[in-house]
Amino acid sequence: MNKKQTQFFYLEVKKIRGGFFSAVEMEKLSLSINQILKSRIERTFQPIALPEIEENTFKHIKLLSQELTDVNDIPQMIITFSEYLEHKLVFIVIILRVLNEGSQPISALLAHAPSSIEITLEKSLIPDLLHKQYPKEASIFRFQVKSSRGL
């Protein structure tokens, strides 16, 4: 494996005979899987600090990465509703784009947002390379917009 390329690992575990895992079984699985994976997987980047949506975040990043197949492809995006606060709607936004020599940093692009929108960049990472040359950048951020009382 190329050391410059980040790989994702996603695992779903189901009982052979169906049904749900008990709390004791979940604890045993969690401990044993963590130990096995930590001993066999090299960490190449810091984990995304979004525990409540981490699983879906990785699924979305993988899906969006598959959509980018050419250097000239437009950025791909998934917007997910996160929460409704008293006067705000909060969304999680994942954008994947192919970086080339003329690419501006995502923070510079987000700076052009209207002042009525609050954007917080949570994480930016490189999940893949296009044609083993062009990095695909994944940016995850929170997007807050004012809402009316009736929503």
Image: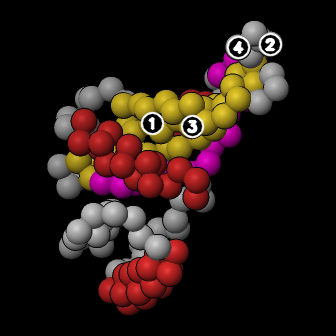
Q: Which residue is mark 3?
A: 92
Of the image marks 1 and 2, the number of the one nearer the N terminus: 1
Q: Which residue is mark 2?
A: 149
For image coordinates 70% across by 29% down, the residue present is 84
Asked which quadrant contains residue 145, the reply is: top right
Residue 94 vs residue 116: left or right? left
- Amino acid at dot 4: Leu
16 relative to 37, above or below = above
Residue 29 vs residue 1: left or right? right
Q: Residues within 10 Å of mark 2 (few under 14, many from 20)?
A: few
| Disc 4 to disc 2, C-alpha distance | 6 Å
> Residue 53: image x %, image y %?
53, 50
Closer to the camera in the image, 43 or 55:
55
- In front: label 3 or label 1: 3
Check whether the beta carbons of the residues at disc 3 and disc 1 lie within 8 A of each other: no
Secondary structure of residue under mark 1: strand
146 relative to 58, above or below = above
Check whether the beta carbons of the residues at disc 4 and disc 2 lie within 8 A of each other: yes
- The quadrant the N terminus occupies is bottom left
Q: Residues within 10 Å of mark 1 (few under 14, many from 20)?
A: many
Secondary structure of residue under mark 2: loop
The tag on residue 151 is 4
Of the image marks 1 and 4, the number of the one nearer the N terminus: 1
Q: Residues within 10 Å of mark 4 (few under 14, many from 20)?
A: few
Closer to the camera in the image, 30 or 121:
30
| Disc 2 to disc 3, C-alpha distance | 21 Å
- Amino acid at dot 1: Ile
Q: Which residue is mark 1?
A: 95
| Disc 1 to disc 4, C-alpha distance | 26 Å
104 relative to 38, above or below = above
Magenta-colored span: 113-128
